[in-house]
Amino acid sequence: MADFLLVHGAWHGGWCWRRVVAILAGQGHRVFAPSLTGLGDRAHLLSPDVGLATHVADVLAVIEAEELSRVILCAHSYGGAVATQVADLAPQKIGALVFLDALLPQDGRSLLDLDSPERREAIVSRVVETPRGPVLPPAPAALYALAAPEDVAWVDRRCVPQALRTYTDPAVLTGAWMQIEVLAYACTLRFPAPDFRDLAAQLAKDPRFTIRELASGHDAMIDVPQDVADLLLACAEVADAAAADGAACDGSSPAPGATAPAEVAGSPTGSFS
């Protein structure tokens, strides 16, 4: 049996993984889908101090408290910025790193830094000042191209504003995450914005990555939970095989100081993360 750690995207919470959790747990696996600070069932913890590093610490705390080892770490959208830093800090704890329509951060730069000036201005114009700090209100769920109207309504009900600092704090990366034996990127086909499909096409040039396409909207874990669960189970099997074969020691992985290829080190944030 495998351990899975699922990191949600902006404005969402652990609730969005409910269907995937049910499938994996139903097969006897351990599954953790924490809500990041200030979001989901932890929305009451929003404060001016919440930033990108807070969310990285949230996920690292789950790994530590649950004593996870060789966990299958999957990140959706904004969660990619969190999970990449988690994997960079604890690569020995990660069996596979799976990106689901996810952002890839760049060392020393914030997610907003990676956007075009026009897009950055559009995002900043939506910021709302609150007693608990500046926040970015949720994007309408209709933007995610979910198949079922009831799912659109569910996502709209559950999403909450997110601390702006999570988008303006710079990422801290050494490149150690690229040592992980199993790296996968899955992009969705029905989401109108091409950003993640473009990123997947770029990553396909890197032999370290396995690329998959999902016939769904952006919130694939809601739209096609069985497909997402199958992807994660396949990654777990490959990770187990890699561990058994000693693939981490075959010389194909980059040194701890290595970084992602320049053309894929960053990705746009837009308003759909």
Image (tube, grey):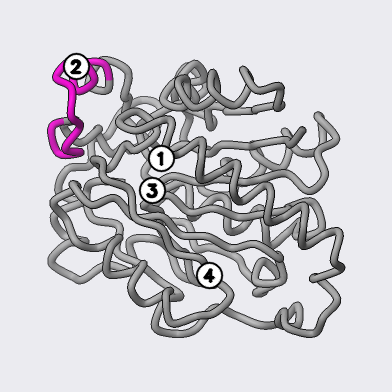
The number of numbered discs placed on residues in the rendered structure image is 4
Where does residue 35 sit, x and y in percent of width and height? 53, 27
Q: Earlier in the sequence, mark 4 or mark 2?
A: 2
Q: Earlier in the sequence, mark 4 or mark 3?
A: 3
Q: Which residues are magenta?
A: 142-154
In depth, the one of 70 and 166 nearer the eye is 70
Q: Are marks 1 and 4 in contact (CB under 8 Å)?
A: no
Count residues near mark 2 (Cα–Cα under 10 Å), then give few for <14, some for 14-19, many for 20+. few
Count residues near mark 1 (Cα–Cα under 10 Å), then give few for <14, some for 14-19, many for 20+. many
Q: Are marks 4 and 3 in contact (CB under 8 Å)?
A: no
Which disc, if any, is residue 9?
1
**Disc 2: which residue:** 153
User: Type of residue at label 4?
Assistant: Phe
Magenta stretch, main secondary structure class: helix
Query: As drawn, is 204 to the left or to the right of 140?
Result: right
In depth, the one of 237 and 21 nearer the eye is 237
Instruction: Identify the residue shown where x is 18% and y is 29%.
Output: 147
Where does residue 54 sit, x and y in percent of width and height? 59, 42
Which disc, if any, is residue 209?
4
User: Type of residue at label 2?
Assistant: Ala
